[in-house]
Amino acid sequence: MLKWIAVPLVLLSSAAHAGPVEDCAQDRDLDRRLRGCTERILQFPSDATAYFNRGTAYLNQGELDRAIADHTKVIQLDGWYAAAYLHRGAAYERKAQFERAIADYGKAIDINPRYAAAYAARAAAYLKVRNTAPAERDAERAVNLEPLDTGFLDTRAHVYEALGRTQDAIADYRQVLSMDPSVESAIEGLKRLRTSPSNQTAFPR
């Protein structure tokens, strides 16, 4: 299964109200983050970063409509917030609203043409709607921008597999596993292609 690549939380910079600021910016306890961000928003209703951090918590909890609402608010406050489009797109994608997801990923790319995570996410969404030509372009762009990212390599491998570019897919899956042997989607990809992780030996049928 292709994995969506999250972006890091944005740290709030205000020294005042340190409790909600710190809670809203931490990523270990989602409930604590939600409480801190909500308190921050009540105090500062125009704080785009607080909405963004709360929206990512909702996304991680699977509260997709709330995640969409918060990232929409971020975009209303700051139309150049590329990560908000990326995360809202991820929520739409998880709701199987693929065209909306693709549009949001495209907007993130318009804002930041070197946003590798947005290219990889859009490639995966294109693949889900069987639009393989743009999926291939986006997957290759993501890897060209960040060639050592296992998630982007894995996405490209899935695209290559869908295109029937078997040897290219095998090469990418193997590279992923050489960097992180625990990536299940790459292991399963090689099994589907009847190839072992380290050499040309076929898996037994």
Image: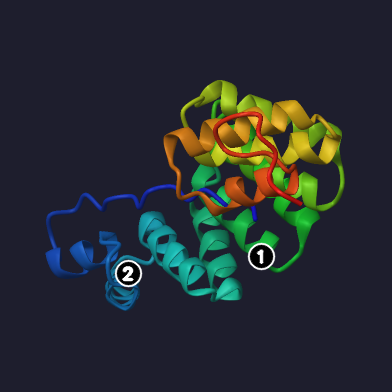
63 left or right, relative to 192: left
Residue at the (47%, 67%) spot, across then down: 60
The earlier-in-sequence mark between 2 and 1 is 2
Instruction: Give the image's coloring scheme.
Output: rainbow
Q: Specify few, some or many for label 2: CA neighbours under 10 Å numbering under 14, 14-19, or 20 or more.
A: many
Distance between mark 2 and mark 1 Cα atoms: 23 Å
Residue under numbered circle 2:
37
Labels 2 & 1 near each other (Cβ < 8 A): no
Q: Is residue 71 above or below residue 172?
A: below
The image's mark for residue 197 is none
Q: Position of residue 139 (x, y in %)?
A: 67, 32
Residue 90 shows up from this direction: yes
Q: Is residue 144 left or right of residue 18?
A: right
Residue at 80% of width from left, 33% of height from top? 134
Disc 2 secondary structure class = helix
| Mark toward the viewer: 2 or 1 | 1
Q: Residue 92 lies in what quarter of the image?
A: bottom right
What percent of the width, then of the height, locates residue 171? 63, 28
**Could you say which is closer to the camera, residue 72 or residue 178?**
178
Q: Would residue 113 be visible to someone looking at this image?
A: no
Q: Say which residue label 1 marks.
A: 94
Disc 1 secondary structure class: helix
